[in-house]
Image: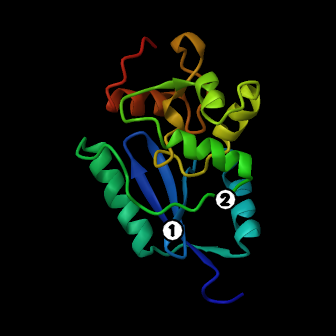
């Protein structure tokens, strides 16, 4: 494999769990919770889609991502400005782009997300695409809650989701 076909990774320890940061070229393509059972499958899919190999070596992008996460967890940053590489279907990319429009401290529902991408009857598919997000926090899938304000599934676990929402000052009744 050519040397430029590398997904550079860096392990990041957040206050609510460990994340694997990954970059391909000059874009962030991974910020995934490493404690999940899907981690290895995610890595294999990423390698296959990008025709690249994962290497444990930091890059300018993963180092910048770690710095921005440090600022976020210190309550000094409310948005991120790194270039992102979405690895997924067109539908998933539509969902992830819509997630980027949810402001810091706000929450929305799966129904809102389905409406936002002009697919109001695709609530379940939207939920699946939301769960397939592998650039957690940067693409704020933690800001999606169930109907009636219920805290529902999150790849990093509900305690991590609660932590992130509380960090952002979301006014929820968990």
Residue 164 location in percent, x, y? 41, 34
Q: Residue furthest front?
A: 118
Residue under the image location 28 percent in, 47 percent down? 77
Colour treatment of the image: rainbow
User: Mark 2 near mark 1, Cβ–Cβ under 8 Å?
Assistant: no
The mark tally for this picture is 2
Residue 173 location in percent, x, y? 42, 11
- Give neighbour class at mark 2: few <14, some 14-19, many 20+ (Cα, 10 Å): some
Quarter holding the N terminus? bottom right
From mark 2 to mark 1, how far is it between C-alphas? 11 Å
Residue under the image location 72 percent in, 46 percent down? 91
Q: Residue furthest bottom?
A: 2
Q: 122 or 23: which is nearer to us?
A: 122
Q: 56 or 164: which is nearer to us?
A: 164
Position of 118 relative to 78 (above/below): above
Q: 50 or 6: which is nearer to us?
A: 50
Earlier residue among tags 2 and 1: 1
Position of 158 relative to 79 (above/below): above
Residue under the image location 65 percent in, 50 percent down? 93
| Disc 1 element | strand
Residue 96 location in percent, x, y? 59, 45
Residue under the image location 49 percent in, 52 percent down? 19
Q: 90 or 130: which is nearer to us?
A: 90
Q: Which residue is mark 2?
A: 87
| Disc 2 element | loop
Q: Residue 40 — which label?
A: none
Residue 165 location in percent, x, y? 40, 29
- Give neighbour class at mark 1: few <14, some 14-19, many 20+ (Cα, 10 Å): some
Position of 68 relative to 109 (above/below): below
Q: Residue 27 — which label?
A: 1
Image-quadrant location for residue 73: top left
């Amino acid at each position: 494999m050519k040397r430029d076909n590398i997904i550079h990774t860096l392990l990041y320890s957040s206050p609510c769990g460990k994340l694997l940061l990954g970059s391909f070229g000059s874009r962030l393509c991974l910020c995934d919770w490493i404690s999940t059972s899907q981690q290895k499958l995610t890595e294999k899919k990423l390698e296959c889609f990008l025709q690249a190999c994962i290497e444990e070596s930091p890059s300018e992008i993963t180092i910048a991502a770690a710095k921005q996460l440090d600022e976020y967890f210190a309550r000094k940053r409310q948005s991120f400005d790194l270039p992102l590489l979405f690895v997924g279907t067109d539908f998933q990319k539509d969902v992830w782009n819509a997630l980027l429009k949810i402001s810091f401290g706000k929450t929305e529902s799966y129904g809102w997300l389905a409406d936002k991408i002009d697919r109001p009857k695709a609530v379940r598919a939207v939920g699946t695409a939301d769960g397939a997000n592998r650039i957690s926090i940067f693409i704020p899938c933690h800001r999606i809650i169930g109907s009636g304000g219920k805290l529902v599934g999150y790849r990093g676990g509900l305690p991590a989701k609660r932590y992130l929402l509380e960090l952002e000052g979301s006014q929820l009744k968990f």
